[in-house]
Amino acid sequence: MTRMEKPPILDSPVDASAIQSIERPHARLLTYYALCCLAILPLFPILILPHYFRYRTMRYRFDNEGVSMRWGILFRREVILNYSRIQDIHLQSNLVERWLGLGRVLIQTASGSSNAEMTIEGLLEFEAVRDYLYAKMRGVKEKGAVNHAAGDNLAATTLDSAALTEVVATLKAVGDEVRALRETIERQKSGGPRA
């Protein structure tokens, strides 16, 4: 048995330029599709065609906003996910995929479905893609949390005592108005004297 070459290891888990340069699945994915279709030999000619066209038209795009995947000839399908929507990321590879050095990255969102929203398949560097997506996902969520906390601190520090006194006075006036309206409505319901 010949030794399989190992997938390239990226310098860092978040090597954005290497991940963003991935646009197509590796050629071994077509081999994987052919082996899967050969398992049902009588149907091989029928099954290989959709898999071949899926492989030929499959495109990925990783950018600073999110990840997208598109494929199809007759029925074009495109899935675009922002990093902020990603909830969980899984790696999956069966025996044949491991033998070929391939893996799939399954991305789940909070859509309520138990299935993956997007499955990026045919990757040699699937672990690096997973790490990249986790870093982007955490970066987006942490940035939002930092911005939210900074906004809370800013609002708390900008209210001085004069502004706070004015806000309290306004809230008391609104409360008095609501109380007067409620009393008027209750008098009208009970048939009492109108003011």
Image (tube, rainbow, N blue to C red):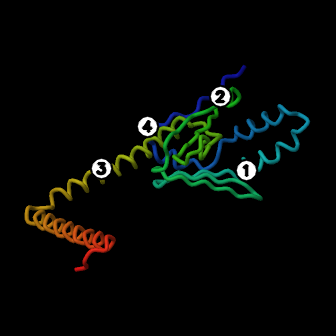
Please state which of the two labelled residues, at mark 2 or mark 3, is closer to the viewer.
3
Q: Farthest residue in the right direction? A: 42
Residue wearing tag 3? 146
Q: Is mark 4 on a helix, strand or loop?
A: loop
Q: Quadrant of the C terminus?
A: bottom left
Q: Earlier in the sequence, mark 3 or mark 4?
A: 4
Q: Which amino acid does label 1 sit on?
A: Arg
As rendered, which of 33 and 154 lies closer to the eye? Answer: 154
Q: What residue type is labelled 2?
A: Arg
As rendered, which of 81 and 14 lies closer to the eye? Answer: 81
Q: Is mark 2 on a helix, strand or loop?
A: helix
Please state which of the two labelled residues, at mark 3 or mark 4, is closer to the viewer.
3
Q: Residue at x 44, y 45 (%)?
A: 137
Crowd band around label 1 with a 10 angstrom C-alpha radius: few (<14), some (14–19), many (20+): some
Residue wearing tag 2? 98
Residue 20: image location, x then y, percent: 52, 49
Please state which of the two labelled residues, at mark 4 or mark 2, is closer to the viewer.
2
Q: Which residue is drawn at 64% across and 34% down?
A: 102
Q: Which residue is drawn at 79% across and 37% down?
A: 34
Q: Earlier in the sequence, mark 1 or mark 3?
A: 1
Residue wearing tag 1? 56
